Amino acid sequence: MDDIVPALEGAKGLTGFWLADREHGKRLSVLVWESDTDAAAAMTRAVMAAIEAADWDRARSFLADDFRFSGPVPAPIDAETWLGVHRALYEAMPDLRFNPSAFDETADGARLGVALTSTHTGTLTLPPLGINGYAATGRRVALPLETATVTVRDGKIVSWANVTPPNGGLAGIAQQVGLELAAH
């Protein structure tokens, strides 16, 4: 084989190439396709990257109209509320990173680890938690690993459910920047 030729470059979820032996007029086709799980992991990575870049419209484009986030919140929240929390965190901590790891297949999506990191360099305001204009502390935040289960339906993320340790989530962020949250 003396050449590699890309193939199917425009096919969604399918890539390939030909190994060509031009001298003997032979070629071997190699195809690789993305499973729904690969697509769910890619979509999950994409929404996290959009949030990390403060590209709120792009982040919203990955979420279904009936999206729900659950876990470290008293009741599930919708897409706008979830993105609003991330927008507030980004305003106070523009180096916010999800640090995803260990993507695993589920029947209808993906499971992964998330360990948020950031630095509190801006004003933090989250009125639902009683946080109004908490000035930057310069403190570094490194949350413990959380397990996230993401469910995809019809090409959109419909749910994101976190299992959060007691010192994780927004309470962990508040603690690490020196805030005490009122009991809700």
Image: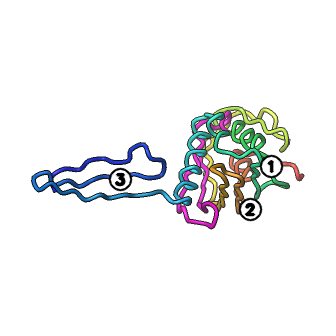
Rendered residue at 74%/62% (across/down): 166
Q: Earlier in the sequence, mark 3 or mark 2?
A: 3
Question: Is residue 103 inside the magenta stretch?
Answer: yes
> Is the Cβ of the residue at disc 3 closer than 8 Å to that at disc 1?
no
- Which circle, 3 or 2, is nearer the viewer? 3
Regarding mark 1 in the picture, which secondary structure is present there? loop
Q: Which residue is mark 3?
A: 16
What amino acid does circle 3 point to? Gly
Rendered residue at 59%/51% (across/down): 44
* Image quarter of residue 144: bottom right
Residue 95 badge: none
User: In this view, which residue lies farthest toward the left?
Assistant: 23
Q: Earlier in the sequence, mark 3 or mark 1?
A: 3
User: From which residue to which does the magenta span run?
Assistant: 90-117
Q: In the figure, is residue 58 to the left or right of 102?
A: right
Which coloring applies here? Answer: rainbow
Rendered residue at 36%/58% (across/down): 31
Q: Earlier in the sequence, mark 1 or mark 2?
A: 1
Residue 77 badge: 1
User: In this view, which residue lies farthest toward the front?
Assistant: 25
